[in-house]
Amino acid sequence: MKFNLLILLILTSCHAYAQNISENDLLNFIQQDLYLQANPFVVQEGNDNTAVIYGNKTQLIQNGDDQSFYYTETSIVPSELKVNMEGTGNYLEIFGNNGISENMQINLTGNDRSIIIRNYP
């Protein structure tokens, strides 16, 4: 199976940066903890995956096809959110952040599942 890796999608305002790298380079990158310097850090493996992130210190890994992730941070203090999405047709939307969402980790596994989270300070 041929892997197409799209890594390091940095969304700031209207600017985006994406780079295709090999699987070995990706493993070296993760082992050296270089992803901690990327804000946000996004790995997408599959087809037609979407990530819209307005926030910092966010880690997203999407394995599968047709996955959508939308995150809007409403506080100046980042939540350090970690999300792992595996499957096909998954949808995750998070609006806002507060003390409860600090260091939150979400694992969404399966097909055609949806999660919507609203956080208010």
Image (cartoon, rainbow, N blue to C red):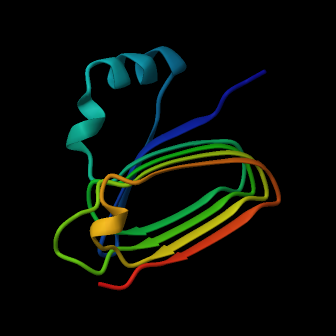
Q: Quadrant of the N terminus?
A: top right
* Left or right position of 37 against 2: left
Total marks in image: 0
- 74 versus 67 height, above or below: below
Q: Residue 27 in the image: state x and y as whole percent.
A: 43, 18
Instruction: Judge by depth and name the residue closer to the eye, 14 or 53.
Output: 53
Which quadrant of the structure image shows residue 99? Answer: bottom left
- 24 versus 35 height, above or below: above
Q: Quadrant of the C terminus?
A: bottom left
- 63 versus 47 height, above or below: above
Q: Residue 90 in the image: state x and y as whole percent.
A: 73, 59
Instruction: Judge by depth and name the residue closer to the eye, 27 or 97.
Output: 97
* Residue at (47, 14) in percent of width and height: 24
Instruction: Judge by depth and name the residue closer to the eye, 23 or 115.
Output: 115
Q: Residue 11 in the image: state x and y as whole percent.
A: 35, 63
Which quadrant of the structure image shows residue 2? Answer: top right
